[in-house]
Amino acid sequence: MSELDYKALGLRVGLEIHVQLDTSRKLFCQCPTRLVEEEPKFHIERGLRPAKSETGEVDPAAMLEWRKERIFIYEAPPESSCLVEVDEEPPHHLDEDSLTVALAIAKALNMRVVDEVHVMRKIVVDGSNVSGFQRTALIALNGFIMDGEKRIGIQTLCLEEDAARKMSEEGNKVYYRVDRLGIPLVEIATAPDINDPEEAMRVALKLGQLVRLTGYAKRGLGTIRQDLNVSIRDGAKVEIKGVQHLYLIPKVVELEALRQKRLLEIREELLKRNVKPEDLKDDIVDVTEVFKNTSSKIIRKSLSTPEGGVFAIVLKGFKGLLGREVQPGRRFGTELSDYAKVWGGVGGIFHTDELPNYGITAQEVENLYEKLGANPGEDAIVIVADQRDKCVKALKAVVDRARQAVIGVPEETRSANPDGTSKYTRPRPGAARMYPETDIPLVYITPGLVEKALKITPEPPDVKLKRFVEEHGLSAELASVLIRDLRLDLYERLVDKYKGSVQPSIIASILVNTIPSLRKENVPVENVTDELIEEVVAMLSSGEVSKEAVPDLMKHALLNPGKRVRELARELGITRLSTDELGRIIEDVIEKHKEKLLARKDKAFAIAMSETMKIVRGRIDGAVVAENVKKKLREKLNIGSDDEYSRQ
């Protein structure tokens, strides 16, 4: 996948896995844990601001959100929310079912369960929590999970409430729906014991799978989220949030390791140039006059407003470094631009490593250097076109980020992009964001609770593997692959539900053979749902389709979202044939190829079988076809005995 030497780089990765629990009620009220798609009629409007912690500090991430001066509009559907969600009523007691599931997971992860559960408040003022904080409780700590022969430490397991759903954003107004707010989440945090991108994916899969095996995990897009903490030697701990798909984890880890490596190379170059943080001044200059006749559409648009202008700063000694690539398609200038966007609210920046371009001429660049008194052979200039106050905030953030580049890799929180790269979102939160929740009483972990949890604790993988081979009749190879599949819990549920009508090996093969094969054909298998798989298995159970039809049926279902599987089966002509229909098809084949069959009796079965399968493939099991072809050859042409067929 990559030419990076992760051992030499000193790569360390820790995971935070968040999984929604499928309980009957939310974590701190009696509302059901379901989402509402119809737009609610009830809305409330709020503004949020950070408060000092018990230590007198204000969390830096919270301060950043507050400075954005946003207004939050909350849609509150009465079917899935109450006064607790809109922060007009104190939270109810912690849901015991959610706590039981968390305890079961802790036991499966060999963790030490706490004696008392205390709920804490975690400051969050981005609007996703109406109260301005998220409630979270530590359940267990100091466990482990095995990845082959390697032990991966599990630091903590927490039970917390999910955030509201962000629906849209218009100007400074952000719209949230609180139906998701309060759905219980388990958060599992590993130690930074992972040293390889593929290992990160394997561990994430095992943890997500383990939660699902309790039978209380929600399914579908957005119900499981992975955050990654990545660092390399001499780099920094960087948190990358919002990795939705397992298959993206290795790419995100690889590209973050690459980014930190490239940033360290930029630092070394700056040190060679004798650049110091104090050399970088936030002396912001109005350079609107330089661009009064510009051809740049972006700058002209900014200057068309009364408040618009163009402002610039000099980055001494940075010539050529802003154009250096740190991730595919992203340069160091992109890193500076991210800071400008987040802290200043501007659309982006221009810098002299990429100019002349974008309608900005070489003469304008020359005039820019002259006005700022900068050295064209050594210095870089960053310009921003927008309202003055926005430009000042943006350029101050650019200078701060440039100073950090001289020191090394900054600790920060980033969000994952669909291609595996990432972008800056905010500084890493500090310890000041956590403080005790005073509205919820503590919960004692009693022997009764532990006993209840043990009943749903997933069995160890080696025990499950043995059971699949001995009881389900799977081959050791198929069982081994299945044990590592994220839909392992679905397999067990379907085997139990369709016992006697669908062989376990067929269900297992759909998961570990059919879906990967479709991925190789570039079929969008990320859209495979449990419901689709069960529909296919149900049709196998009822005899409506044969196992040979499954790949085609699933392929067309994924390429035609919204259509029912039965409807597609009819359109494709792969509904199962009756024995009478099969008999008539075989008779037609024998009649059509009669001369050839009589002339080559030793190959008659193979010929008749091949011609018949061309017509019926996917509509009936091959073994049934073979049995009926033999029967019809004997009846119609007096060809063949079982001994003869066995020799063909």
Image (tube, grey):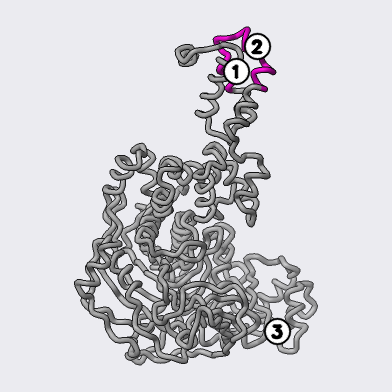
Is residue 12 visible from the viewing direction of this image? no
User: Residue 271, relative to residue 48: is it above or below?
Assistant: above
Q: Residue at x 74, y 71 (%)?
A: 363
Q: Amino acid at mark 3?
A: Gly
Q: Residue at x 54, y 66 (%)?
A: 332
Which mark is drawn over residue 309?
3
What residue span does the magenta drawing correspond to?
588-609
- Which is more N-terminal, label 1 or label 2? 2
Label 2, secondary structure: give it: helix
Say which residue label 1 marks: 607
Q: CA distance from mark 3 to mark 1?
A: 81 Å
Task: State the image quarter where residue 47 is shown.
Answer: bottom right
User: Residue 422, relative to residue 66: is it above or below?
Assistant: above
- Which is more N-terminal, label 2 or label 3? 3
x then y, percent, for residue 394:
58, 80
Q: Is residue 564 left or right of residue 513?
A: right
Q: Are marks 2 and 1 in contact (CB under 8 Å)?
A: yes
Question: Closer to the observer: label 3 or label 2?
Answer: 2
Frontmost residue, 155 versus 213: 213
Label 1, secondary structure: give it: helix
How many neighbours does mark 2 have within 10 angstroms: few (below 14), some (14-19), or many (20 or more)?
Answer: some
Say which residue label 2 marks: 596
x then y, percent, for residue 554:
57, 46
The furthest residue to the top? 599
